[in-house]
Amino acid sequence: MQVFVVLLWAVLGLCAGQKPCCTPDQWEGTIQELQGFLVDDKLGTVDGSVEVSYDFTNQKLALAENLNETGSGNTKLKVIQDYKKGMQYAIQGNSCMEFVLKGSMRKQCIPDNATHIGSFSLGGMTAGGLECDSFMTTVAGSQNTYAISDMTRDGCYPVTQLSVNLIREHSTVTTQVFTDVTAGIKDPSVFTPPEPPCDKVMLEDTTELGSDVLKRVRQTFEQFI
């Protein structure tokens, strides 16, 4: 028992030393998502995937969703954001709309005030296991919205994220699993809007662009990682 306690404290000591990190400036992957929600006394679920292409070097982000929601059926939508041009595009089927994009692109980082809550090896405690670190983050100004993000020790790639949003009218619990994550951008045309040019839409606030889950995916890039 005494040996076990010594080893436990040694492991805890290593865990406590892990600091928040930033993802690579370019990466791609697919988010597999499952969400349960309670909105105005209505219970439901959302499940599906969002393909992500993140390019901080060139200030671009592309998100393509394929989601199923209780009562709403299937939604397929792609959003391209080009921060250098200050434009974003929403493509759904043969329809494309162009919006003004305000603000600057945020680098994907675990916030400095995040709490490191543990480390683990994905795939077992073997030589081939993937070492990961877990961080808990609360959204600034809110005591009812928080997330636990698991990141790889080597490279700081996202692995999983569990987020909880407890609001009287709109509460959600969301699990996101990041799959097939790779460094770099394989095909830069993923950021190219379709031709002919998209219809221009004059909106001051584009936070409502896309489905509820796609909004939350975009918020993920702004709030947690």
Image (cartoon, rainbow, N blue to C red):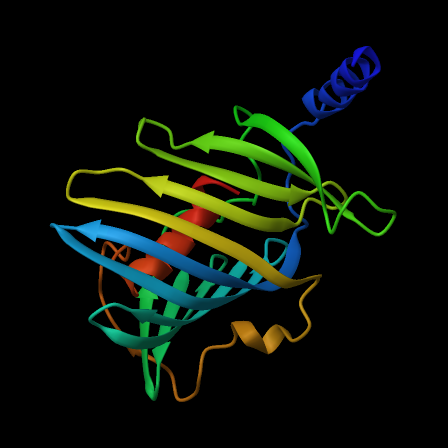
**From the image, which quarter does the N terminus lie in?**
top right
Residue at far front of view = 1
Residue 104 visible in the displayed image? no
- Residue 52: give x, y in percent of width and height: 53, 64
Left-right relation of 216 to 114: left
How far across and down, in percent of the image, does residue 48 sit?
42, 68
x, y percentage for residue 186? Answer: 69, 72
Number of marks drawn? 0
Q: Quadrant of residue 141?
A: top left
Question: Vertically, is 144 above or below 181?
Answer: above
Q: Residue at x 45, y 60 (%)?
A: 33
Nearer to us in this view, 22 or 56: 22
Q: Residue 47: x, y in percent?
A: 39, 65
Quick check: can you spot residue 197?
yes
Q: Nearer the viewer, residue 193 or 120?
A: 120
- Dividing the picture into quarters, in which one does residue 89 lie? bottom left
Q: Nearer the viewer, residue 126 or 65?
A: 126
Task: In the displayed orientation, state which residue is furthest to the right.
Answer: 127
- Residue placed at 74% from the left, 51% from the top? 123
Identify whether 216 is placed above or below 116.
Answer: below
Residue at 76% x, 23% y: name it. 11
| In this picture, residue 45 sits left or right of residue 19 | left
For residue 75, side relative to residue 187 (left or right)? left
Outermost residue toward the left?
A: 40
Q: Residue at x 64, y 43 (%)?
A: 151
